[in-house]
Image (cartoon, rainbow, N blue to C red):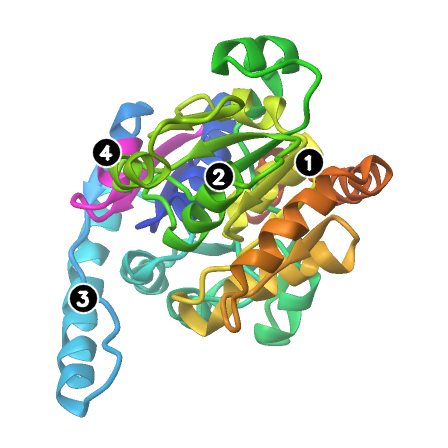
Amino acid sequence: MAKIALAGGGTGGHVYPAIAIGDVLRERGHEVVYYGDPDRLEGRVAPEKGYHFQPVRALQYPRGGIVGKVRFAWGLLLAILATRSMLKRDGIDLVLGVGGYISAPPVLAAVLTGAKRAIHEANAVPGKANELCGRYSHLVLLTFERTRSRFPEGVRKELVGVPVNPKILDGDRQKARERYGLDADTPVVCFVGGSLGAARINELAIACAKASGREYQVLHLTGPRYYDEVKAAIGTVPPGVKLVDYENRMADAYAAADLLVCRAGSATLAEICAVGKPSLLVPSPNVTENHQEENARGLEDAGAAVVVVEEGWDLDANVARVAALLDDSDGLERMAAGARGLAKLDAAAHAADLVEQLLA
């Protein structure tokens, strides 16, 4: 059995797919450790999941300025050399980078130790770390076919999708609605801004909750950061509206919903497809190379989602759009079927198979 390092993180879209692949590899008898930033998400989640965690220190890529870029290059070199010693000490046979700036030192250090290198790219547009590491990898695991051309010709590229936690499939519609205090027979739109929330999605959720003559229910996962603000904006919470600050049982939220309104991070989209739910996607404009819109367009092209961008945002039009979508049961079912058609429920196992082939 091999010793494998997962490397990267910073966001759930990087960390949770890595953990999903790592769990499969551990089940198959491999020893798996996690290399990442101790002060970001992976520093908490990986140890909670039982992974031995190795802290890596590195600088984020600067947005501009020659001085910053020189400092970054020097810091990256030092981080690579430090991580090389860690890889040798730990006897790592393969490094799987999952994106985020912290993934670059372990993957590039593996070039120096002779360990195998693979990366997983969750988005339609690769981040800078994966763009760099892809040039030095033996294997690139892709989520979107359109991403294939963004990596060098000589590198093996395989389409696997984004691994999801199988527990998201465990939701029960009736029990979930009972838990939230929602009516069993009235349509539900679920607004999800992610663990931190999203201001534009919250704005739309508030407007929908307060809409005159609303004939649907609103389940609003505000994010802890925005909960008090949203509650104050709504005032007395109307019937058929449920506010939740943070949801650690997303299976319930998905099960309760007839329509999801959310951002377009790769992990979120993978879960939407896995549970087969129609969605109205509002991509975050504050991401590298606008990759969330590229992600979202993939679902839209498959008939699984409607995409609304923040540029030229029209709140009243989008409130009307939510109502129109919920009023079209046949359209919702077509979108749900489109989402299910994109689902890759075996993504973690498929990725683990390819990693093991690389080690053979």
Tell me, yes or no, if residue 104 can be seen here: yes
User: Which residue does the numbered mark 1 point to in the structure image?
Assistant: 277
Is residue 149 located in the magenta-colored stretch of the structure? Answer: no
Q: Relative to 115, say whether 149 is above or below.
A: below
Disc 4 target residue: 44
- Sequence order check, earlier mark of 4 and 3: 4
Q: Is residue 121 left or right of residue 321?
A: left
Q: CA distance from mark 3 to mark 1?
A: 38 Å
Answer whether residue 32 is magenta in the image. Answer: yes
In this view, the residue in front, 127 or 215, is 215
Q: Measured along the vertical axis of the image, is residue 44 above or below residue 121?
A: above
- Residue 140 visible in the snapshot: no
Q: Residue furthest bottom?
A: 66
Tell me: residue 202, above or below residue 33: below
Q: Which residues are magenta?
A: 30-45
Q: Label 1 crowding class (10 Å Cα cut-off): few <14, some 14-19, many 20+?
A: many
Kind of residue at badge 3: Leu
**Residue 59 circle label:** 3
Query: With respect to residue 173, does 190 lie above or below?
Result: below
**Element type at mark 4:** helix
Q: Identity of the amino acid at label 1?
A: Lys
Looking at the picture, which amino acid does disc 2 mark?
Lys
> Mark 4 and mark 3: span between their CA atoms?
20 Å
Task: Left or right? Give the position of 48 relative to 175.
Answer: left
Asked whether, in this view, residue 135 is left or right of residue 294, the answer is left
Amino acid residing under circle 4: Arg
From the image, tell me which residue sits under label 2: 210
195 or 118: which is nearer to us? Answer: 195
Q: Nearer the viewer, mark 3 or mark 2?
A: 2
Residue 352's quadrant in the figure? top right
Image location of residue 109, percent across then percent down: 29, 61
Report the Cα–Cα distance between label 1 and label 4. Answer: 30 Å
